[in-house]
Every structure is written in structure tokens, then in C-alpha cells.
Amino acid sequence: MRTTHCDYFLFPEVGDTLVVGAIPEELQVALVAPTWHNFIEGNYVVQDTVRHDIRVTDNRLTDRQTPINYDMSVTMVD
């Protein structure tokens, strides 16, 4: 990631549970659309069949010279 955030787009089914995490754990991982949900508070159960936007944010540095590497895990459980 070269900027402060990176977005991922999913199209889950109603009733699916999104289980999301990132390493390093200092990164914030949140659902930003169709509603806001911070995954640090737990998993998210899908309510609608629209696009779901997950954002990984790193607020530790504002002027990044080199990109950071991170691992992200997204599991959709039906």
C-alpha cells in the first residue's frame, strides 16, 4: 500500500458472514459501504446483495516513501 488506504469490493449473498482481518494488526479494516462496520468489533452479517466495500487504512505515516506490505484475509461464510 503506497497511500493511506486500499479498497476491496465484494458481492456477497444475504446472510453471508464476512470475517476480515489484516496483518500487521495496527491496520484498520472496516466495511465502508453499504454501511459502516469496524471488523475489530467482530464479523458482519450481510443484509443486502449490493457491492460491499472493505477499506484497509494505515494512519501511522502520512508521507510514505515506500509502500508497505500487509496480509489480508477475507472469508465469506454462508
Image (cartoon, rainbow, N blue to C red):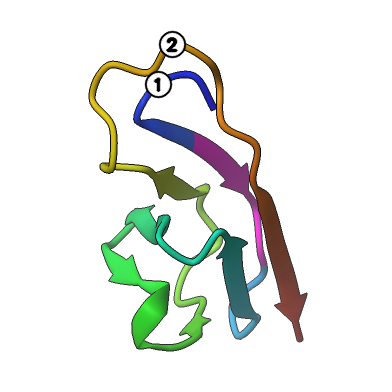
Q: Nearer the viewer, residue 67 or 8?
A: 67
Q: In front of the other: label 2 or label 1?
A: 2
Upstream in the sequence, badge 2 or badge 1? 1
Residue 68 to residue 56: above or below:
above
Q: Residue at position x 45%, y 77% from top?
A: 47
Residue 77 to residue 38: above or below:
below
Q: Quadrant of the C terminus?
A: bottom right
Q: Nearer the viewer, residue 18 or 41?
A: 41
Dot 1 lies on which element?
loop
- Where is residue 20 shown, x and y percent of the image? 59, 70
Q: Name the side, left or right, on which 54 lies relative to 73.
A: left
Q: Which mark is residue 3?
A: 1
Q: Name the side, left or right, on which 32 lies relative to 71.
A: left
The type of residue carrying mark 1 is: Thr
* Residue at the top extreme of this rendering: 65
Q: Residue at position x 60%, y 61% from top?
A: 23
Q: Nearer the viewer, residue 33 or 14?
A: 33
Residue 25 to residue 63: above or below:
below
The type of residue carrying mark 2 is: Gln
Residue numbers of the magenta segment:
7-12
User: Is 71 covered by the magenta stretch?
Assistant: no
Q: Residue at position x 26%, y 42% from top?
A: 59
Dot 2 lies on which element?
loop
Where does label 2 land, which residue?
65
Task: State whether the magenta stretch is mostly helix, strand or loop.
Answer: strand
- Mark 2 to mark 1: distance in Å? 10 Å
- Where is residue 71 shown, x and y percent of the image? 70, 52
Q: Do tag 2 and tag 1 residues touch (Cβ < 8 Å)?
A: no
- Where is residue 19 shown, x and y percent of the image? 62, 78
Q: Quadrant of the N terminus?
A: top right
- Where is residue 31 shown, x and y percent of the image? 39, 59
